Image (cartoon, rainbow, N blue to C red):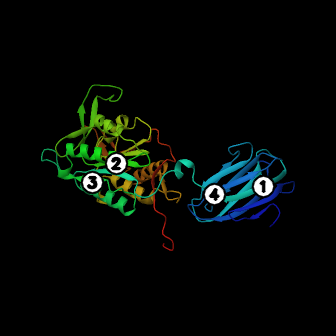
């Protein structure tokens, strides 16, 4: 191996030293350069330990993105745990925190396990879902295109990926009554346990009705899910979510005024909400995707793996949020929306993670097939 760096393989540890005559950074620190090959989705730990200097590492991806680390969890050694975002050759620059420091070091790149919070999330059919889509409404309400299909397609996608538990329920059109949704929610919730994820999905009309001004309803309007024979309010949906005893719960509402559900439902640990529009604005039908709403289309894609940004076969809360925001920025940028009294604006996505952490797992995807594309 050449002095001051070279190629290493994952699982290998090497010894070296920073010394006068090494390459230097522009700021005066000595640096040794190493390379290793990795695959997208691999989780690795890059370690640099030294008793002679304050260790500092820079990992540079094949496409040029750089990740820096000064101190690991303990002391002045450097430790970076990364999920590799792409296939190819990675460069690691070993250096010191202050200019001119020298001395021996130990360097390794090793395979790393998932953090305990993620490792505890089992794969398989752990998503317990109630998916509701209404297109056929009474005459005085008006029909919608594709919203019933939104619920069916989401169920089909999650079932195909092996994550949908058989206790899950799809209610569309005439099935989607107030009593039917309440009963199905209770039935699915009762079967979902502390290791499971609960998903409530709705695509259809959203409504607003006057209510006293409070901290939960500062605009004096309560939001509702419009079903075939009545409505379920944001307050009632909050009470239904309070009955859950699950690892995580995800509320997805693709309907006019849906952002107003956030304050009522995302008010306890482990609940994340995703809403197609702000609480006083309408949501559009996504005709170009043959979907009842843009959010429905993108949630389905994201949960089936498109949101898995680093390829580790986990869709985390942060990844799903980032994916949805990016899709809305590109596809929904100029979609007009309006308030009940005719004020005009644009449709904007609302995401509230509440107490759900960025790296909390929404769904563990099945292992990628080997030998495929």
Q: Is mark 4 in CB contact (under 8 Å) with mark 2? A: no
* Quadrant in which the N terminus is drawn: bottom right
User: How far is mark 2 from mark 3, CA to CA?
Assistant: 16 Å
Q: Where is residue 252 in the image (x, y as percent from the top left)?
A: 35, 47
Q: Nearer the observer, disc 2 or disc 1?
A: 2
Neighbours of disc 3 within 10 Å: few (<14), some (14-19), many (20+): some
Residue at 50% across / 43% down in the picture?
357
Q: Point out which mark residue 106 bears.
A: 1
Q: Left or right: where does residue 346 sit relative to residue 89?
A: left
Assign a secondary structure to mark 1. Answer: strand
Mark closer to the chain start, 2 or 3: 3
Assign a secondary structure to mark 3. Answer: strand
Mark closer to the chain start, 3 or 1: 1
Mark closer to the chain start, 4 or 2: 4
Q: Position of residue 240 (x, y in %)?
A: 31, 39
User: How far is mark 1 from mark 4, CA to CA?
Assistant: 16 Å
Instruction: State the residue position of label 2.
Output: 191
Neighbours of disc 2 within 10 Å: few (<14), some (14-19), many (20+): some
Q: Is mark 2 in CB contact (under 8 Å) with mark 1? A: no
Instruction: State the residue position of label 3.
Output: 170
User: How far is mark 4 from mark 3, CA to CA?
Assistant: 40 Å
Mark closer to the chain start, 1 or 4: 4
Q: Left or right: where does residue 278 sit relative to residue 49?
A: left
Assign a secondary structure to mark 4. Answer: strand
Q: Where is residue 348 in the image (x, y as percent from the top left)?
A: 37, 44
Q: Point out which mark residue 44 bears.
A: 4
Assign a secondary structure to mark 2. Answer: helix
């Amino acid at each position: 191996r050449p002095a001051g760096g070279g190629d290493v393989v994952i699982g290998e540890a090497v010894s070296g030293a920073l010394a006068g005559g090494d390459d230097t950074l522009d700021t005066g620190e000595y640096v040794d350069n190493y390379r290793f090959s990795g695959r997208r989705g691999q989780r690795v730990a890059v370690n640099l330990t030294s008793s002679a200097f304050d260790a500092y590492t820079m990992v540079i991806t094949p496409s040029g993105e750089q990740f820096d680390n000064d101190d690991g969890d303990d002391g002045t050694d450097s430790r970076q745990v990364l999920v590799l975002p792409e296939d190819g050759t990675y460069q690691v620059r070993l250096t010191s925190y202050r200019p001119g420091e020298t001395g021996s070091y130990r360097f390794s790149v090793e395979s790393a396990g998932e953090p305990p919070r993620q490792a505890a999330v089992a794969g398989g059919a752990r998503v317990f879902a109630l998916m509701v889509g209404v297109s056929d409404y009474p005459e005085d309400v008006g029909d919608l295109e594709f919203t019933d299909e939104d619920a069916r397609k989401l169920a089909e996608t999650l079932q195909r990926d092996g994550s949908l538990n058989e206790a899950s329920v799809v209610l569309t059109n005439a099935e989607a009554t107030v009593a039917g949704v309440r009963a199905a929610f209770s039935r699915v919730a009762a079967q979902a346990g502390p290791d499971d994820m609960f998903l409530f999905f709705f695509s259809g009309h959203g409504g607003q009705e006057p209510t006293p001004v409070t901290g939960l309803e500062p605009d004096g309007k309560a939001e509702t899910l419009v079903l075939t024979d009545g409505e379920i309010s944001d307050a009632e949906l909050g009470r239904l979510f309070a009955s859950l005893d699950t690892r995580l719960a995800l509320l997805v509402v693709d309907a006019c005024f849906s952002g107003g559900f956030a304050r009522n439902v995302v008010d306890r640990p482990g609940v994340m909400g995703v809403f197609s529009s702000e609480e006083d604005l309408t949501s559009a039908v996504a005709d170009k995707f043959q979907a009842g709403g843009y959010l429905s289309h993108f949630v389905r894609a994201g949960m089936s793996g498109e949101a898995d940004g680093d390829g580790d076969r986990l869709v985390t809360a942060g990844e799903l949020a980032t994916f949805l925001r990016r899709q809305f920025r590109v596809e929904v940028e100029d979609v007009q929306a309006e308030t009940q009294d005719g004020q005009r604006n644009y449709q904007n996505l609302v995401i509230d993670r509440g107490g759900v952490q960025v790296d909390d797992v929404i769904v563990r995807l099945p292992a990628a097939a080997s030998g495929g594309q």
